[in-house]
Image (tube, coloured by chain):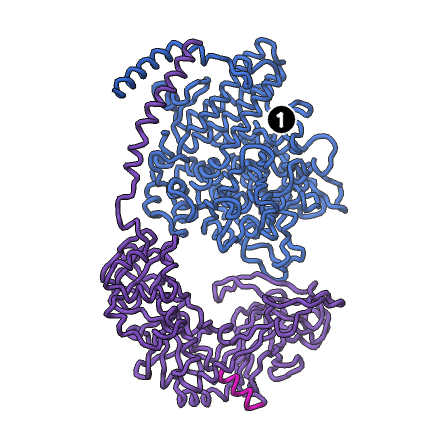
Amino acid sequence: MKRINFLGLALLMAVAVLPGCKKVFDIKPQDQLDVTNAYQNVYDADAAVVGIYGKFMALADRYVILNELRGDLLNYTNNANEALRQISTHTVAAGNPYASPRPFYELIINCNDALEHFQVMVREKRMTEDEFNQRYSDVGSLRSFLFLQLGIHFGEIPYVTSSLTNIDAVKNASNFPRLSFPVLLDSLIRFTEALPYKELYPAGTNLNISVDGYPTQKFYINKKVILGDLHLWKGNFTKAAEWYRQVMETGTQGVANGNYYSQYKLGWDSNGDVDHYITYSRAGDASTLVTNTQWRIMFEQAFGTSGFDREWVWALPFDSKFKPDNSLIKLFSPIGGDYLVKPSNEIFNLWDSETQRVAQGGSIPYDARKLLSTSTIGGQPVAMKYLYNYLNYNTLAPASLLTKNGKWFLFRQTHLHMRFAEAANRAGKHLLSWGFLNNGIAGAYPAPTSDVTLFHNTLWEPYPFNFDGRNSGSSGVPFYRSDWYRNIGVRARANLNNITVPASDSLLTIESALITETALENAFEGTRWPDLLRVALRRNDPSFLADKIYNKLQKDGTGDAAAVRSKLMNPANWYLPFNW
Amino acid sequence: MKSRIWMIACALMTAGIFGSGCKKTIDDQTAVTDPSLTKNLMALISEKADLSTFAGYLKQTGYDAVIASSRTYTVFAPGNAELATLDAAIKNDPVKLKLFIGNHIATQVYSTKDVTSTTRILMANGKYLSMKGTAIGSAVITTTDQYAANGLLQQVNKMLPALDNCWDFVAGSQSPAKQKAFMLSLFRNVFDATNAVVIGVNPVTGDPVYQAGTDSIFTNLFWNKVHDLRDEKKQFTLFMLEDAAWDAEQARFAPYYVTNTADSNKLVTGWNVLRDFAVDTLYEPGSIPDTILSKSGTKLPVERSAIVNTIRTSNGIVYIMNRINIQPASKLKTILIQGENYNGTSHDRRGNTYFRDRYNPVTGMDYKDVNVFNHGVALFNIRYQVEEVPSIKYKAYWVAVNDFQTASFNQRLAPGIATATTLPYIAVPANNFNEVYLGEFTMAQYQAIYNFYLVAANSTTAAVNPLVCDYIKLVPSL
């Protein structure tokens, strides 16, 4: 009896509910903005840009995992789950969440949606041409950055430039043909070069202001850097160098002050908070390494300080005052986090194989950036760069356990100089490249006498390779203080000796040294795998990449190093399967 | 609107149908049907005729209420036949009986199926027993894993007597007299404010003033400096020498610990002989190796033929020996002084002191050293404090790397006082990364604390009077 009753009721319910549904539920939400009303004026456009960057920040841990854990400087800890172990040991199985391109495409489709609406808005005069140019170019460049990341990690990918309502359509190869990496680069270069605006948001616009105490200028992608990167990947070395050079000259305007000479120029300013040297308060006494200013402080100092502004090109803040939560503390920190990744033995070996400049008799037999990039907490090695706004350097304790502030570092002047040098080296300007790597322009072109007129410069070179680093000193005649006179080179800044180059092979020696130097200087900052991949592709030399991954796995005793090496000797295995 | 009312009505009606129908089914599925689970451990034991003696003791000691409580236990119950042989001395002493019965109750659930590797399990009397599968202590579980509402009952084929621990044995009547007397002589009053009563505050220093007698604890040096043999959680192997062997050992080592008085010589010698006699690893008689490394790194040779007696304790094992032939070369250690770890300098010259990180091409290793340069003081010295230096002859060496100037300079190692000329000035030439022999010196007496000085040349000239030292090595020369 019960059963019959129940069946009857179920039928009745179905009949009763179905015709009612549409009317009942088709009500416009009252506390959320409907898509049809989202893009009314420039403030709505600004909100869209901020929203896209907010969502972009959710990719921070994924960015670090893909770009560093696949490389040789970072490895997983005992706390890491199977998915992270697979990424690190290049044995990714289906369903690995970190190997899914979906989060990138979700954001790309958001970008596409914003770009389409921006075009409608400018057509319908809801924002001015200038406002359109700035915002359209920003979102477009970020989209190119995302596509470049996808190309680096997945090889052949669909180039989706329209907004979709269903993300899963991307997966269907018949909807969107997949472009090979070189073709993708061509498409990205064509699109990004055509963007109407390449500068930063001008001061006074709503997107270049101060919010929650953070000046927002460095939040947005530097369009010239991504253009430089695209050309560098493609092998257009002079073109890449031109774009990088424009960024390097960012400070070269207005009054010739400290910023003029040192922003993005790797120039000194006689101020530890700006210079970012590796230095000792008494040279030769290893116990006097300067830690509360100089090199380490660049990771701790606040947005808007001159040291930060002159070093960093692109960075985003994590703050307990706003979302998203700091995923990098979760990834790196044993205190207040899960401690899922740690520095590999390989990066320690790289640091330990350097020697510092002679002081008090001999050389300190390691690169001191080791001591400032990592720490030992509870007996375990910890990559510290992302944690300096959370853990106090001296006590290794958080000021407040739940106040998980930090930064997502994306690009700084050493990346810029190393990539410019990489392009210059391939363009045949080996000595100039060597100078940026070692002890600067004046170091590469030293003057035999106090008259520096014909030295300290490369003014005979065409743009973008014509630098003027002339510095006559206080007594030299004629007197020179040229734009690049303070440039000191990446290795000199880190108190390291110059790399010597055999006369027979400067091209490959310098190129390899540039990549190694980026590892020493920018370890864990999310560029190692792309650096290895780019050079391996350019040289058509899989061993350049495979040997380094082999070293990491072998020295850490993780994974089957030999099998991974032979796997990576086939370039087809450099990319993750495109699937989610 | 109409459709909404319908929906609500339907929802209410279906809820009613489910509500009335479900209750019974769930009850049926979750009801306790196993009769064992309705009884607690005490009830289960009381039911078994063979465990009636054990049940009687449980009631006598008050453990019956414990194992009838809602916490979980494992009870290892010997049968009436086994308990019949229980010593009357235990049976008639309520304290001993409680200790004995408590040794049969574990405070967690241990199933023979789950304990597959040797596990130390905590018993209700605070002692530990080793369990693996059906083996518990020296007994075997015959009827396994009988469950009750609050734990497991394991019936065993032997009693599980509550043994003394290692320290109880030492302090007891069966241990060799002389070593026992020495170990018991090591009790000292040691400052410990944990239970101190504060009766005031020192107006000058602001430190608390403690009531006399409450600010210290009476403790044994052996517990603090070697191993606390009372600790039931760990397992120890302790060696005790018979009286004749103990005396012989004292006589053998006395010359290495010469002091001003016979009493202090006896104390220091005794202590140094004794300190290597306990390790915190359990070595079974069948598998004890011929050499054991003590806590202080001394090689302790174990001749099986010299084992006179073997006593099992609740936290390990004690071997009574008639000979332990420890080699002086193993007991008397090389002293290594790291140059950068100094205790003082004759003048404050931190501004001229460099702690240097360097690479040594001879050893292929990185090292850290100390270098004092341009300090401007004739006979400037660095002081190193070393503890417990025996009265023997030492050969001295150092590694001192002069990589900061091409000129050679002199420095000296001075034992005892900075002006001692026991060892000569030794030249430190440029870039010598090897160990350099400095000479020999003899310690006339054992020193509890002794200073060594690294002394600069008698000059105020920077190039003449630097000091540099990676390490100083003092090797016993016997």
* Residue B330, horizontal then vertical, whole percent: 44, 79
Instruction: Kindly identify which residue carries mark 1.
Output: A200
In this picture, residue A504 sits left or right of residue A178: right
Depicted B114 relative to depicted B171: above or below: above
- The tint of chain A in the picture is blue
- Mark 1 belongs to which amino acid? Leu
Residue A531 shown left or right of residue A303 in the figure: left
Q: Secondary structure at mark 1?
A: loop
Work out whether B377 lies above or below A263. Answer: below
Residue lying at 40% horizontally and 66% vertically, measured from the top left: B125
* Majority secondary structure of magenta residues: helix
Q: Residue at x 45, y 29 (%)?
A: A103
- Chain B, hue in figure: purple
The reply to whether the magenta stretch includes residue B265 is yes
> Where residue A112 sits: x, y (%)?
49, 19
Q: Position of residue B454 (x, y in %)?
A: 63, 75
- Residue extent of the magenta highlight: B261-270
